[in-house]
Amino acid sequence: MSDQVSTIAMADTAKPSGVRWKIFLLMLFLISINYIDRASLSVAMPVIAKEFDIDPAMQGLILSSFFWTYALMQVPGGMLADRFKPRIVIALATLFWGFFQALAALSTSWMLLLLTRLGLGASEAPIYPAGGKLNAIWMTQTERGRGATLLDGGAPLGAALGSIVIAWLMAAFSSWRVAFVIAGVGTMLCGLWAWYYIRNVPREHPSVNEAEARYLEEAHAIEDAATPPSSGASWMAYFRFRSVWCMCLGWMFFNTTFYGLLTWMPTYLFKVHGFDIKALGGASFIIFFAGFVGELVGGWIGDNWRERGGSPNTVFRTLFGIAAIMATVSIFLVAYVTNAVAVVVLLSTTLFFLRWCGMYWAIPSALAGRGKSGFLGGCMNLGGNIAGITTPLIVGFIVQATGSYFLALMYFAAAGIALLICSTLIDYSRKLPV
């Protein structure tokens, strides 16, 4: 009996184990792999376009095809995460998208390549809604900014590493096909790792100590006490609220600029500023790594401000406002600068501030709570990936019609202004009574 009492007493004074941060470092790694795989086609496109004789408009179609199924599966992916919990959804998604990434290496025409991109998009779709669900389950209200930016930080980090890794593999093996196979097999191994380490509930994890489990349970109990009771309305009742629409639209305008740079920036630097494959890989790494650093900085500022008593509306509106304004000004200036180094600096600045909006992944749990955060995260990412579908196509047609990237850059700047408006109109301070 005395041993049991001493064990409880030690648990009360022990330091929380911090497994939640390790899980989100794993999610950072998985999302990075996610973006290495999806960015691989952008890096390889100059070579593939020559091999398959693809014009700019058709390149835009192929680059956008990933987002057709990716967007279509966002809400179903979020609902799967709510119903079956995030662990199985994350593991299976990773296994399947690795398979389609490797399968792309067998393509003998642009049509077969497009079909593998459709499979890749459907497989990758659940990872973000399930990650948002993990953020609601494993993080407290004042930790979710960092949780969100660790989750979403994999996007610029993966894009940065993708440029280096895929370009290096293509150069080392003189083949984009070998590069795609290696990336795909590596991804499938990561899916097995995700299943091994992730758990749906903190107390289920063998490495979580009593102090961490109790810390999270107490924080969630306080949060739940402030949550309005369910009205029993259907899931679609969320769309009666302005905040939900602005969340979805804001994420769409954010992704208009980010996906535009992700899909077309390598070709832009290659065509307009004369970057060769090595310079292209290095510049892309610098630009997207600046976005990764900016994302972590934004999450740290947001959570520290919240911990010091900052209200959700003040914190998020201020940080998202700064992010939108700085990104808009930087991308606007890119259109008027001819020096290659200055262009890289401005694009790095664009992504450094734009990626502060990774904290958008804290919004679904702020509006819906843990029970329906997967669904709302899927809705948000559906909005974001409408931009993924349309932006590569729009940029492709602009470039083909005008022979210039100027109007494409103005399109990105306009999206930044719209992001500012939407982010300001969201009420981050209360959960919706649905």
Image (cartoon, grey):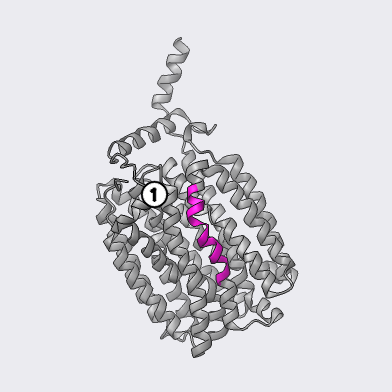
- Single out the residue that lies furthest toward the front: 233
Alpha-carbon neighbours of circle 1 within 10 Å: few (<14), some, or many (≥20)? few
- Single out the residue that lies furthest toward the bottom: 402
Where is residue 346? Give x, y as percent: 42, 76
Q: Which residue is tagged 1?
A: 235
Examine the structure image and report whether residue 73 is included in the region drawn in magenta: yes
Q: Is residue 33 visible?
A: no
Q: Is residue 50 visible?
A: yes
Where is residue 50? Give x, y as percent: 68, 81
Segment tinted magenta in the rendering:
64-79
Question: Which structural element holds mark 1?
Answer: helix
Q: Quadrant of residue 357?
A: bottom left
Between 282 and 122, the residue placed more toward the observer is 122
Q: Residue at x 29, y 51 (%)?
A: 305
Q: Is residue 303 left or right of residue 205?
A: left
**Main secondary structure of the magenta stretch:** helix
Q: Residue at x 62, y 61 (%)?
A: 119
- Single out the residue that lies furthest toward the top: 1
Considering only vertical position in the picture, is 211 above or below 400? above
Between 66 and 362, the residue placed more toward the observer is 66
Q: Amino acid at mark 1?
A: Trp
Where is residue 135? Give x, y as percent: 43, 46
Where is residue 425? Give x, y as percent: 27, 62
Q: Quadrant of residue 12?
A: top left
Examine the structure image and report whether residue 44 is included in the region drawn in magenta: no
Q: Residue at x 58, y 58 (%)?
A: 122
Q: Quadrant of residue 193?
A: top right
